[in-house]
Amino acid sequence: MTTQTAIPVTPIRSAAPSGPTVRAKRPGGVGRFFKRAPVRVFLVVLVLVELYPLFWLLMGSFKTQSEFTSNPTWSLPEQLNFENYVAAWTTGSIATNLWNSVAVTVPSLFFMLLLGVAAAYALEIMVWKGRNTILLAFVAGIMIPGQMILVPLFTVYFRSGLTSTLWPLIITYTVMGLPLTVFLMAAYFRAIPREIFEAATLDGSGMIRSFFSIGIPMMRNAIVTLALVQFFSIWNDLLIALTFTTKSSLATVQVGLLNFSDEYGSTQYGPLFAAISINVVGMLVLYLFLNKQIMAGLAAGAVKG
């Protein structure tokens, strides 16, 4: 008969020290503040540099003519004079100019994006001989200065009887914006996997249906981004609008701003600043409203896959 010897069990002590635990001390708030102070000062200065011209523009729109000529340029208006906005809207015909700009910009963007996106789809998704040569021809169109073709275009429009309408502006903006539109949209289409369109073809979808059902929805953010870039380019143009505008009733916003100066060189600064403020504030509101779509479109073009 064997006897079993009991083995004493020694309790395992914790490796942690019995004293108070010591935690890593993070840098204090004062040190972190002074460490980031140069960046914050730079951002504050940058914001002031960006906002001061807008503030000066808005304050100038409330000044009278005597305040512009007598007081310093940095002085504030003595009172809020809304008569400048009334004069800009009625006497300055800024309402007509805004309507003309909208009537020119919207059709130009529509034709430019429709033709440009369709051309980029055909050059990147469809396989056919000579597509690389056509794409290089569109890229070469970016390098042609628009100032070189204004006089021949004016001659063609005059002989066609289009100079008394807005069609010369619409046609010119559409054609001059196509090279950049095709080039950028082709780069966006290149980032989309070809297997998506191949699967749609196997399911019985044709090229036109794939373009409207797959291509345009997937390129929505990119189209919005490019549309906004081209919108500002068309809206802020002065040279082309001034060349092909033969009547004051057809003047766009940028051409209409010249109406605040008479033939003797005298400028009504109050209504002029008011008209510019209406234009600038409207553009800022549009940009802030489409800010998320713009960032999404830029990210879609920067990340492939």
Image: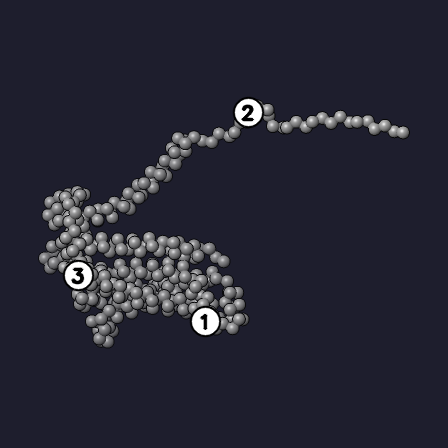
Kindly identify which residue carries mark 2: 20
Mark 1 is surrounded, within 10 Å at the Cα level, by few (under 14), some (14 to 19) or many (20 or more) other residues, namely few
Tell me which label, 1 or 3, sits earlier in the chain: 3
**Amino acid carrying mark 1 in the image:** Arg
Front residue (pair 75, 136)? 75
Residue for badge 3: 93
Going by the numbered disc 2, the residue's amino acid type is: Pro
Query: Which numbered dot is residue 209?
Result: 1
Q: Nearer the viewer, residue 116 or 3?
A: 3
Q: Position of residue 264 (x, y in %)?
A: 10, 57
Q: Where does the image place residue 189, in percent across and percent down from the top left?
A: 45, 63
Q: Position of residue 300 (x, y in %)?
A: 44, 57
| Distance (Cα) linking label 1 and label 3 | 45 Å
Circle 3 packing at 10 Å, graded few (<14), some (14-19), many (20+), is: many
Kind of residue at badge 3 = Ser
Query: Which of disc 2 and disc 3 is earlier in sequence?
Result: 2
Q: CA distance from mark 3 to mark 2?
A: 79 Å
Please report contact status of discs 2 and 1: CB closer than 8 Å, yes or no: no
- Picture quarter containing residue 181? bottom left
Q: CA distance from mark 2 to mark 1?
A: 72 Å
Secondary structure of residue under mark 1: helix
Marks 3, 2: nearer the viewer: 2
Left or right, 133 with respect to 108, comes to right
Q: Residue at x 17, y 42 (%)?
A: 75
User: Which quadrant holds the N terminus?
Assistant: top right
